[in-house]
Image (cartoon, rainbow, N blue to C red):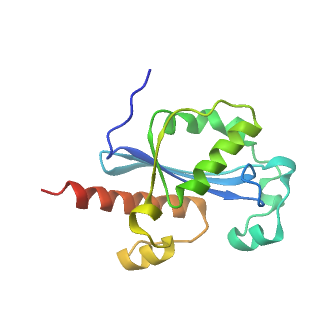
Amino acid sequence: MCTMSFLHTFTALDFETAQGKRNSICQIGLVRVEQGVITKKLSLLVKPPDNFYSYYNRLVHGIGPMPTRNAPTFDKIWPLIKPYICNQNVVAHNSSFDISCLKQTLSYYRVTVPEFRSHCTYKIYKQKLNVLCDAHGIKLQHHDALSDATACAELFILYNQKNTAV
């Protein structure tokens, strides 16, 4: 059995969805941080159920049915990302949305939700991601899952550095 990771070791996540249903993940951004250093970045397109997209969501992130028509479904991607989530510290900006997407998508595919500890940079900083990135000089291509996850990771690293400084 795994134990929770050290706080400076975590996985930052961001999901983009195809529609209002939170089980409609169409892009995953995952950034692994070990001992305060980014060690892995992963961006994956995911075929959502029925490959259906709402007009609004397409406007937000620019992803539609063509790029994901041959992408794997979430249940096929899960074994690749599970080690970065299971018994880990998982960080997201507005984690209530991203964690809900993860749990609802796992439930949709009848996959057991693993244990993990979630942290939210929105709750920590109380500002929107793009505003924080501007303030801290962090590059952001907003609503690209990998860019959002990277920005979230960098913000959590800054938070940890500030709160562990002697």
Q: Is residue 9 above or below residue 122?
A: above
Can residue 14 be spotted in the picture? no
* Residue sitting at the far top: 1
Decide which of 7, 58 is in the foreground and name it.
7
- Tell how many labels: 0
Q: Position of residue 158 (x, y in %)?
A: 31, 62
Q: Is residue 93 above or below residue 86?
A: below
* Residue sitting at the far left: 166
Using the rendered view, name the quadrant where residue 103 is placed: top right
Which quadrant would the N terminus be assigned to in this image?
Answer: top left
Q: Residue at x 77, y 58 (%)?
A: 67
Q: Is residue 138 above or below residue 4?
A: below
**30 left or right of 67 in image:** left
Can residue 12 be spotted in the picture? yes
Q: Residue at x 66, y 50 (%)?
A: 101
Q: Is residue 63 above or below residue 42?
A: below
Decide which of 116, 83 is in the foreground and name it.
116
Q: Position of residue 146 (x, y in %)?
A: 55, 59
Decide which of 96, 66 is in the foreground and name it.
96
Which quadrant would the C terminus be assigned to in this image?
Answer: bottom left
Q: Residue at x 24, y 61 (%)?
A: 162
Using the rendered view, name the quadrant where residue 153 is placed: bottom left
Q: Position of residue 14 (x, y in %)?
A: 57, 56
Q: Residue at x 78, y 50 (%)?
A: 48
